[in-house]
Amino acid sequence: MNKPWKVALTFAIVFLAGGVAGGLVAIRMTPTFVQRRVFTEQFVTSTMRFLTENLKLTSQQVEKVRPIVANTGEDLVKLRQGTSATFDRMNAGIMRELTPEQRTLHEAFLARMRERDDRDRERARQREAERAQKRLSDGDKPDKDKSSPDGPPLPPAGAKP
């Protein structure tokens, strides 16, 4: 009673399911990879700009400080990933304890939080793009009359707080 079409159909279904799962993983991981790289680049750029403008770093200091800042950016990305995994574990544990109705409510809440986070990231990207455009239009000169967008200017060397 072997029916080869059943075996072929089973293999086809497993193959298609693997393709769908792989596609979903790729869709989920690609933005994460891009966000990680973009975050690190933005962190290094803004931190180095702040340090260079406010501390008047020499070119030798810039060369030595940039790798330190870049390593910190990578560490922050790893920390964020760990935090994300911790929240995922927490939410999975919570979901196991909820009724079906509560699960629906909790899933809706998590979806709203993801949407909020996406909006916040988009606003941050827009602000950074606007700052970059302003720097280009200002001839890349720091504005001495205003605080840096990355924080207040540092007091002069030797000044007492």
Image (spheres, rainbow, N blue to C red):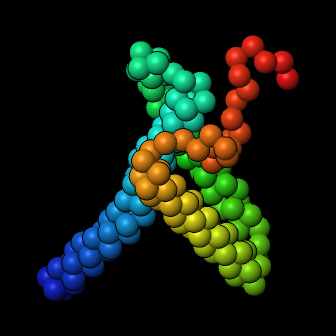
Does 73 appear above or below 89? above
Q: Position of residue 20 (x, y in %)?
A: 32, 73
Q: Nearer the viewer, residue 9 or 75?
A: 75
Quadrant containing the N terminus in the rendered view: bottom left
> 89 left or right of 4?
right
Residue drawn at x 71%, y 39% is 152
Q: Give coordinates of residue 34: x percent, y percent.
A: 39, 54
Q: Residue sitting at 74 percent across and 80 percent down?
A: 105
Say which quarter of the image contains residue 119: bottom right
Residue at 74% across / 64% down in the picture?
Answer: 94
Quadrant containing the C terminus is top right
Residue at x-position 55% and y-position 60%: 127
* 58 w.r.t. 125: above or below: above
Residue farthest left in this picture: 4
Kindly indicate the quadrant of the structure image that contains residue 109. Answer: bottom right
In this orientation, which residue lies closer to the viewer: 40 or 100? Answer: 40
Depth check: 43 or 83 in front?
43
37 up-or-down from 130: above or below:
above
